[in-house]
Image: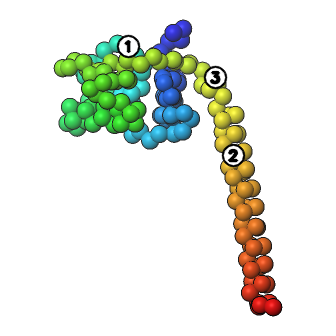
Amino acid sequence: MDTSRSSAEVFRFGAFEASVHSGELRRDGMKIHLQGQPFLVLALLLERAGDVVTREELRDRVWPENTFVEFDYALNTAIKKIRAVLGDDADVPRYVETIPRRGYRFIASVTAVRDSLCRHEMPVMELGTAADQAGWRRERQLLIGMIIMAFVLGYLVRRGPG
């Protein structure tokens, strides 16, 4: 990989893309909900892909000293949520490997992109807007067709048999 992972803004792996700047995870372009702390854990694992990230490093980076939580429970829950959204399995991992009593390692191939402009965010947003407008046009045409059909049916019912 030719870009530094620590300065990356976007990580791509498999069908997924994680944007550190926006805190969003996407699969095939569709946004997937992943809460704040699980996303931060995922971002750190992606930043250090291939390396073991110790539980202590995760605690120091994701849970500040003034945070009062049951750390083991919070970390285990975060990892479960990450695995759930990635469709990963702890017994046969494709993304997140557990290193018993030490930490975790991101094992899939990761591409890091430093410049968010490389993502072509504007065209994607414009395509989304165009798709919304096209959808509205179809809905409007369908609605007009249904109104015309209601008038025709009303006319035929009033006219009666004959």
The image position of residue 158, as x and y in percent, is 76, 90
Seen at 52% across and 18% down, the residue is 112
The residue tagged 3 is: 118
Seen at 72% across and 56% down, the residue is 138
Based on the displayed image, in which of its 4 quarters is residue 68 positioned?
A: top left
Callout 2 amino acid = Ala
Q: What is the number of the mark on residue 50? A: 1
| Residue 48 visible at all | no
The image position of residue 43, as x and y in percent, is 42, 26
Chain-order first, disc 2 or disc 3: 3
Local packing at callout 2 (Cα closer than 10 Å; few below 14, some 14-19, many 20+) is: few
Q: Quadrant of the C terminus?
A: bottom right
Based on the displayed image, in which of its 4 quarters is residue 65 positioned?
A: top left
In the image, taking residue 31 as reference, residue 56 lies left or right, namely left
Pick whichever, 105 or 36, lies toward us. 105
How many labels were placed on the picture?
3
The residue tagged 2 is: 131
Gap in angstroms between the C-alphas marked 3 and 1: 24 Å
| Residue 135 visible at all | yes
Gap in angstroms between the C-alphas marked 2 and 1: 39 Å
Callout 3 amino acid = Cys
